[in-house]
Image (cartoon, grey):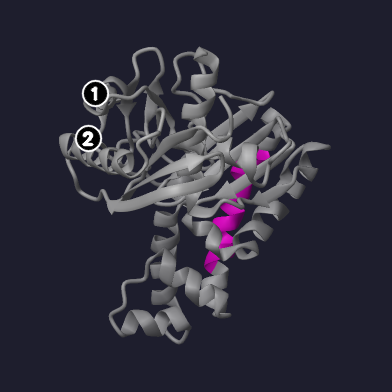
Amino acid sequence: MSEATETIGVDLGGTKVQVGVLAGVETLWESREGSREQSQDELVELIVREIEAARAARPDAAAVGLGIPATINQARGEAIAAVNLPLVELPIRDLISERVGLPVFLDNDGNVAGLAEHLYGAARGKPTMVMLTIGTGIGGGLILGGQIFRGATGAGAELGHVVIQADGPPCQGNCPNHGCVESLASGTALGREGRAAAESAPDSAIGKLLAEGVDIDGLVVTEAALAGDETAIGVFDLIGSRLGVACASFANIFEPEAIVIGGGVIAAGDLLLDPCRKEVRERALTPMNETPILEATLGNDAGMIGAAALARTELEKQS
C-alpha cells in the first residue's frame, strides 16, 4: 500500500469532528462539524454523514481510520468509555463499516495523533516517543519501537489520567479519579485557573475582560498571554509546571527520544513548554531529564492525519 493510497481519517473530539481524505500527509478533501452535546446515536450519524460526504468527493478512498477520545477494545472494535463524550461500549468500528461499506480501523485519538507526529511531524524518525494532546482534556499516545503501544486490550496509554496530585480536584467527565494531569493542566483547567487569576488581579488584561463580561476561557487566556499580560503568563507558568510534573514521570518510565505536545493549548508555544521543560530538567532522573519537549508540528490536523495513516498501515498489514 503506497503513500498515494487514499484513506479517510476521522478525528472525533470533545467539541468537533474533523474528517479528511488523505494520501500520505496531503489532504485532498476536508470537513469540520461541531459534536458538542450530541447523543451516542447522533455522533454515529454525524460520523457516517461526514464519511459519506468524503466518499462522494473522493470515491477512490480505500478505508476509514477513526480516532476516538475513548478507551478502546481493539479485538471487538469498541469504544469502551469516553471522559468527555457519551460513548459507552459502542461497537463503533462495525457500525460505521456496515453503514459506509468500507473497512474501518479504530484507535484512541491520542494514539493516532502520536502516529501522525511520528510519521510526518515533530518526532519523525524517532521510534520511541510520547504524545500528549491538550484540549478539552488531555489525550496520550505512545510509539514504542516504531509501533503504537495499546496495552493488553487496546485501552492503554491514557496518559492524561496519570495522577500528579493525590488529593487534587476531581477529574472531569466520566473519570472517577482525583488530581489527574487532565484535571490540572488541560484547556479546561487553563480556563478555570484563568478565571481565578482574573478575579484576583482586576487590573490585569484578563481581569478587565472579566469585568466587561467576557467569558475567560483558555483561548482568552492564551491571547492575553501572547499579548504580554503578566497575569495570563503566570497562568501558563502554573499549567506548564503541572504538565512538566507529568512529563518528568513519562521521561523516567519510557526514556523517549521526544515528548511531543499538541492540541489547542499549544498555541501558547514556549509560554506553556518552557515551564514544562524546567520541571522535567529538575525532576527527571539523568539522562531522562534531557528529554526534548517538542511542539507538535501538524497542529489541529494531527488526529485526522494519523487516523488516515492508521487506515493505510492496517490495510498494508492485511495485504
Amino acid under disc 2: Val
Residue that numbered label 2 is attached to: 44
Residue that numbered label 1 is attached to: 95
**Magenta stretch: includes residue 246:** yes
Using a 10 Å C-alpha cutoff, classify the residue at mark 2 as few (fewer than 14 neighbours), some (14 to 19) or many (20 or more): some
Per the rendering, the mark at residue 174 is none
Name above or below for residue 207 compared with residue 159.
below
Residue 29 image point, x, y percent = 40, 49
Residue 3 image point, x, y percent = 58, 34
Residue drawn at x 69%, y 36% is 251
Residue 259 vs residue 12, the one in the foreground: 12
Mark 2, secondary structure of its residue: helix
Per the picture, the main secondary structure of the magenta-coloured stretch is helix
**Magenta region, residue range:** 235-249
Label 1 close to label 2 by CB (< 8 Å): yes
Q: Tell me: 298 left or right of 204.
A: right
